[in-house]
Image: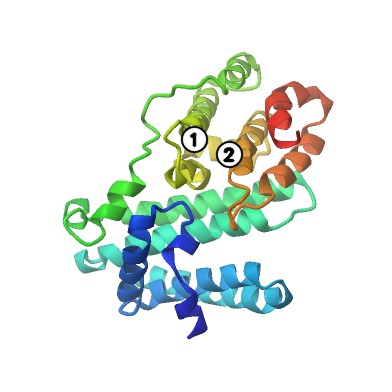
């Protein structure tokens, strides 16, 4: 019971606007009480936050989070294929599972950067898998449901929009001239960098608010499959781009789901790439390690 009472959408999704938080919590819990796999994911994410906020009971709550997340994934897999009535719980589940997976990836302190990369790739693949399942749902009907305001908010920072800032110009130049990438790989790196610039633009906006942190959490979802493959191969070009992602993480360090992940990951990356790639990381190091 404590896990249910502890759950709130503003805790699970810290960047959600205040006017959506209370209604969103009520919606998630209402749907979860009718959908076991969603309920298990709610319990898992609630336990994950309690593990963070109760250090003396970390192992207990972290174990609870793993247990309920495993049940959630098993239940969701058993529910396929989705019926039209199951669209809303599936979309909510996909969003919460993606968030939980990223939280674990960012907060597990790895011994070296390759171990982090492997974890990040698994996270991105899990997010892509759950997203693929819900791509066939009836979005027109969802936009007429109670979920509509949350869907509109979630797509408000579309990465297809143009960029304004120039923080990533140097990174794009390095991607353009590095000899180790074929055309497909090079374009996937450009796309990954584009999304980073969109996120930095949002944070630099005079109208920046909690919503401006969305790209911190959605960058891994928008990554091209080819770029994720480069990460899985531990390619230095793709790894260096992760270094620029740590700047986004650094901006969100006040959030419980992020903390000092940016600084920790960048430190591992600097050791991994060595002096040969140091010029790729000059700007992120000047921000994160200053």
Q: Is residue 285 left or right of residue 206?
A: right
Residue 126 location in percent, x, y? Answer: 50, 55
Look at the image and tell me in which quarter the C terminus lies: top right
Residue 37 location in percent, x, y? Answer: 40, 74
Residue 158 location in percent, x, y? Answer: 36, 37
Residue 80, can we see it? no
Q: Which mark is residue 257?
A: none
Instruction: Choose between 189 and 207: the one closer to the eye.
Output: 207
Disc 2 crowd, CA 10 A, few/some/many (<14, 14-19, 20+) = many
Name the element at disc 2.
helix
Work out whether 177 lies above or below 188.
above
Disc 1 crowd, CA 10 A, few/some/many (<14, 14-19, 20+) = many
Q: Is residue 193 left or right of residue 270?
A: left
Would you name the residue on which mark 2 appears?
A: 248
Residue 198 location in percent, x, y? Answer: 46, 31
Q: Residue at x 65, y 52 (%)?
A: 259
Q: Residue at x 82, y 30 (%)?
A: 274
Work out whether 144 lies above or below 62.
above
Q: Which tag, 1 or 2, sits closer to the chain's start?
A: 1
In the rendered image, which quarter is residue 249 located in?
A: top right
Instruction: Choose between 122 and 210: the one closer to the eye.
Output: 210
Residue 78, can we see it? yes
Q: CA distance from mark 1 to mark 2?
A: 7 Å
Q: Are marks 1 and 2 in contact (CB under 8 Å)?
A: yes
Q: Most extreme residue toward the bottom, as rendered?
A: 1
Work out whether 186 lies above or below 8.
above
Would you name the residue on which mark 1 appears?
A: 199
């Amino acid at each position: 019971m404590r896990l249910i009472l502890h759950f709130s959408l503003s805790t699970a999704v810290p960047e959600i606007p205040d006017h959506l938080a209370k209604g969103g919590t009520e919606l998630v819990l209402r749907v979860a009480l009718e959908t076991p796999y969603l309920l298990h994911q709610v319990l898992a994410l609630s336990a994950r936050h309690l593990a963070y906020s109760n250090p003396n009971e970390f192992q207990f709550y972290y174990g609870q989070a793993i247990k309920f997340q495993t049940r959630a994934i098993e239940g969701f897999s058993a529910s396929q294929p989705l019926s039209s009535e199951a669209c809303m719980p599936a979309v909510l589940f996909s969003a919460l599972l993606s968030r939980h997976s990223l939280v674990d990836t960012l907060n597990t302190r790895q011994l070296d950067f390759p171990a982090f990369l492997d974890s990040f790739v698994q996270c991105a693949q899990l997010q892509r898998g759950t997203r693929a399942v819900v791509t066939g749902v009836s979005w027109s009907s969802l936009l007429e449901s109670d979920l509509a305001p949350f869907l509109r908010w979630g797509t408000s920072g579309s990465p297809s929009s143009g960029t304004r800032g120039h923080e990533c110009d140097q990174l794009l130049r390095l991607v353009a001239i590095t000899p180790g990438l074929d055309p497909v790989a090079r374009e996937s790196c450009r796309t990954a960098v584009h999304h980073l610039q969109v996120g930095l633009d949002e944070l630099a906006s005079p109208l920046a608010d909690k919503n401006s942190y969305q790209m911190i959490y959605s960058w891994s979802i928008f990554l091209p499959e080819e770029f994720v493959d480069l990460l899985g191969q531990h390619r230095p070009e793709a790894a260096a781009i992760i270094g620029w992602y740590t700047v986004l993480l650094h901006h969100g360090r006040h959030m419980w789901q992020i903390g000092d992940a940016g600084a920790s990951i960048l430190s591992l990356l600097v050791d991994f790439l060595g002096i040969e790639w140091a010029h790729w990381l000059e700007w992120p190091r000047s921000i994160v390690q200053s």
